Amino acid sequence: MLHELHPALGEATAKFIRAGHQLLIDGRWQAALSGKTFDVQDPATGAVIACVARGEAADIDLAVAASRRALETGDWPKLKPADRARLLMRLADLIEKHGDELAELEVMDNGKPLAFAKRGIAGTAEMVRYMAGWATKLTGESVPVSVPGEWHAYTMREPVGVVGQIIPWNFPLSMAVWKLAPALAAGCTIVLKPAEQTPLNALRLGALIMEAGFPDGVVNVVTGFGNEAGAALAAHPGVDKVAFTGSTATGKRIVQAALGNLKKVTLELGGKSPVFVFPDANFDHATTGVANAIFFNSGQVCSAGSRLYVHRKVFDNVVADVAALGDKMALGHGMDAGSQLGPLISRVQMERVNRYIDGGLEAGAERASPRRSTPSGDGFFVPPTVLAHTSRDMSVVREEIFGPVLCAMPFDDDDLDQLAGLANDSEFGLFAGIWTSDLRLAHRFAKRIKAGSVSVNAHMVNEPALPFGGYKQSGWGRERGREAIELYSELKSVAINLGV
Ligand code: NAP
Ligand code: MG
């Protein structure tokens, strides 16, 4: 039994949600071979809104075979780089054309407020265009060699091959596009496995990819569960590379599954990103930035600024202001006008986050946010929560919570090596934020931080040209930027003996 949909949804969105959802394999929509399906919930109400095919290992086999055919035969390998760029540009236009529908699907799938989902559409289309530009610029070089004789030697880049892509539920559309766009620009073919909680936008995107004119089998979308479809894809001997975004624990499983054929692996994993506020920072700018860094998307962001270090001189004021900003955020259904904070993705996630908050308080942290009630009904809401006077050994400070929970700690030191010790006191190394008006300090500190990205007086810059990825257990490889497309290629060197 499917529940009523939110009345503010557009007609196209409602129609799509209600359609029977099948797997996209070889350019055709088809049911899972087993005939099984699974339910999709609206996280703001807990109601079942859609039913989706439950792909398993046998469906992954079909999708990988279709990808292999598309890689080696038919039109795709014959396309010129400029043709691939043109297809991607067409896809970007289609994403914008259907932007309202995609944004609404994102709300119904993931729960985020509509205004944020809409903002995400523009960034998603720009990512596709940025990667389209690289399709014609993925060059090798000529290499002067020193061995005896007369030589012509050069390198060239070729598509890595059939790629398995496994993505999480926090940004269902942009995570799909961050993965698909560079792989397509490089000439790969793909089997995409979206998160079980958020399959709808990946399916809609699959339809737009076909509409853009990509040949059959270039992009296949297999919805299903991680331990079924996901595990089969990661282990598949016919897959040349697996690209994964999600938790560090699952990332390690992916690495193990990839051992069989030593497929290439890139991982974008968890974080516990530190944010430092120095006493000379612009106060309003910094507190707003700190609040957004943790509360945006209800804290379900791999680069969320979840460890806050504030100079003791301004600690109380900053913490009080950030807590007040969180307290003012309107919780509600993402389709309700005025909602600023949606639910978490699932009951499991809500319970997990609440356990962390309780555990932190039991371990001695102080609640700096007032207690507040959540919207009535069965949605998975957790209000913004600031925990003050946390310490380095608490699990709230060490582990990725993936919810709107900020751990605040004061610092006295001006010694940057000591402060870097705090920043780097984590198994993760994805991101760090620095708020100061002293640019010399900012440069010196950024250099000492072991993280893939550092922002100064901003939190996360959603820029396709800037590489993004992790040091330490936050991952392998980079997304965005030139590095992303290079990681979907193999480098070949060719040496020609001109002396014979
Ligand atoms: P997850 O297990 O890492 O899920 C991410 C993706 O991997 C999903 O598509 C998932 O499928 C799939 N998957 C799960 N097990 C797999 C396996 N054995 N082989 C191949 N694929 C597999 O994350 P989660 O369970 O949804 O969330 C748990 C925690 O992970 C969160 O609380 C959060 O701390 C963290 N997380 C981090 C990020 C990030 O970007 N850093 C994103 C999401 C979650 P299913 O959807 O079917 O499980
Ligand atoms: Mg999971």
Image (spheres, helix red, strand yellow):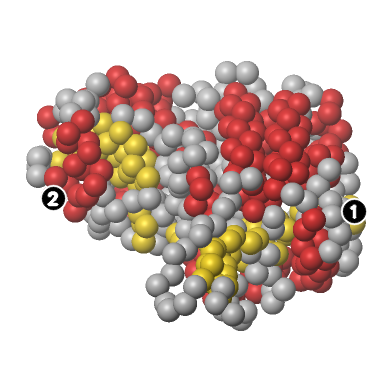
Q: Quadrant of residue 433?
A: top left
The residue that label 2 is drawn on is: 418
Query: Type of residue at label 1?
Result: Arg
The image quadrant of residue 446 is top left
Q: Is residue 3 above or below residue 393?
A: above
Residue 169 picture location, percent across and down? 61, 48
Q: Residues within 10 Å of mark 2 (few under 14, many from 20)?
A: few
Image-based side of 405 in relation to 115, left or right: left
Q: SS for tag 2?
A: helix
Residue 33 as seen in the image, left or right of residue 314 = right
Q: Nearer the viewer, residue 448 or 103?
A: 448
Task: Specify the label residue 92 is tagged with.
Answer: none
Name the residue at 65% across, 41% down: 132
| Ligand 1 within 8 Å, label 2 CB | no
> Which of the pair 12/333 is nearer the observer?
12
Q: Is residue 441 left or right of residue 147?
A: left
The residue that label 1 is drawn on is 28
Left/right of residue 101 with respect to residue 114 in the rendered view: right
Counting from the top left corner in percent of width and height, residue 235 is at: 65, 74
Q: Is residue 153 above or below residue 15?
A: below
Q: Is residue 272 visible?
A: no
